[in-house]
């Protein structure tokens, strides 16, 4: 009797765990990733992945999570291109410096997107080393876009928030790939 009660409790806990497994995967992975890289906020990580997994499917392992985060980063970066184009069109003052920076950002985001394409290919062929290089290049592009505005005093970047989001998405991809390397 005692034994079967134990068994029932065990089964209930087990079923609860597995139905909740994917969500736990996101929570656990984000916890580990945000610990390993302080540039990644835990809340950002969880909310981005929850949104993404609603739209596609729940990730069942760390590999899924890497694939999902790269796709998420790619779609975020792709959406940046028309935003930058519109900012360029909206420039009222003939501010050549901001204009040049925005044009650079447009090219940087395009470069970043092709790095992400290569990261997907590398990741699919289990070449984590190259995936890591490509993701790092993509990460650097978002930093370069933001930093060039600071090169001239008095200029503020109209993309600070967007660059920061994109930076964190890239940090998240990198952290997951590094976790995969260690597991
Ligand atoms: C956070 O990002 C900066 C670059 O913006 C980098 O120099 C620093 O090492 C990163 N910190 C961590 C904890 O990864
Ligand atoms: C995703 O699902 C969660 C819980 O199921 C819900 O709270 C959230 O609003 C959903 N997000 C989107 C973007 O649909
Ligand atoms: C990028 O992702 C963030 C966080 O999920 C979202 O708020 C933002 O709207 C996205 N930006 C673009 C350009 O898609
Ligand atoms: C560009 O200007 C239009 C009209 O003023 C505005 O609705 C839009 O939000 C602006 N776009 C950006 C990216 O700032
Ligand atoms: C991705 O990394 C590989 C391996 O280092 C490199 O050959 C390739 O040029 C990179 N792709 C991009 C777009 O930088």
Image: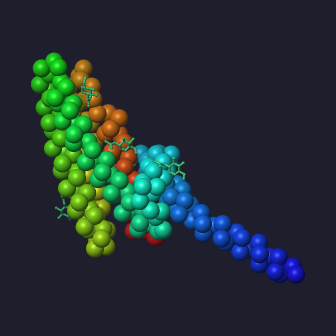
Left or right: where 97 falls relative to 66: left
Please say whether residue 60 is visible from this viewpoint. Answer: yes
| Residue at x-position 26% and y-position 62% | 119
Left or right: where 123 falls relative to 118: right
In the rendered image, the vertical position of residue 22 relative to residue 140, given as above or below: below
| Residue at x-position 11% and y-position 25% | 96
**Quadrant (top left/top right/bottom left/bottom right) for the N terminus:** bottom right
Q: Quadrant of residue 84?
A: top left
Could you tell me residue 76's position as x and y percent? Answer: 31, 47
In the rendered image, the vertical position of residue 114 relative to residue 87, given as above or below: below
In the rendered image, the vertical position of residue 90 relative to residue 104, given as above or below: above
Please say whether residue 45 is visible from this viewpoint. Answer: no
| Residue at x-position 33% and y-position 57% | 71
Number of callouts: 0
Q: Quadrant of residue 95?
A: top left
In the rendered image, the vertical position of residue 140 relative to residue 21, given as above or below: above
Q: How is the image coloured?
A: rainbow
Furthest residue toward top: 93
Ligand 5 placement by image quarter: bottom left
Could you tell me residue 17's position as x and y percent? Answer: 63, 67
Query: Of residues 99 and 12, which is closer to you in this image?
Result: 12
Could you tell me residue 143's position as x and y percent? Answer: 28, 42
| Residue at x-position 28% and y-position 64% | 120
Could you tell me residue 86's position as x and y percent? Answer: 20, 32
Left or right: where 120 falls relative to 26: left
Left or right: where 140 falls relative to 12: left
């Amino acid at each position: 009797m005692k034994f079967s009660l134990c068994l029932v409790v065990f089964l209930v806990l087990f079923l609860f765990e597995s139905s909740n497994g994917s969500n736990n995967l996101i929570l656990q992975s984000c916890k580990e990733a945000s610990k390993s890289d302080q540039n990644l906020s835990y809340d950002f990580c969880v909310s981005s992945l929850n949104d993404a997994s609603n739209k596609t499917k729940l990730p069942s392992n760390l590999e899924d999570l890497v694939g999902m985060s790269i796709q998420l980063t790619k779609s975020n970066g792709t959406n940046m291109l028309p935003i930058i184009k519109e900012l360029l069109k909206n420039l009222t003052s003939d501010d050549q410096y901001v204009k040049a920076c925005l044009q650079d950002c447009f090219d940087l985001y395009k470069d970043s997107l092709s790095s992400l394409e290569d990261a997907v290919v590398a990741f699919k062929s289990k070449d984590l080393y190259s995936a890591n290089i490509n993701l790092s290049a993509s990460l650097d592009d978002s930093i370069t876009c933001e930093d060039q505005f600071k090169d001239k005093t008095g200029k503020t970047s109209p993309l600070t928030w967007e660059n920061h989001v994109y930076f964190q998405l890239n940090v998240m991809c990198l952290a997951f790939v590094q976790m995969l390397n260690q597991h």
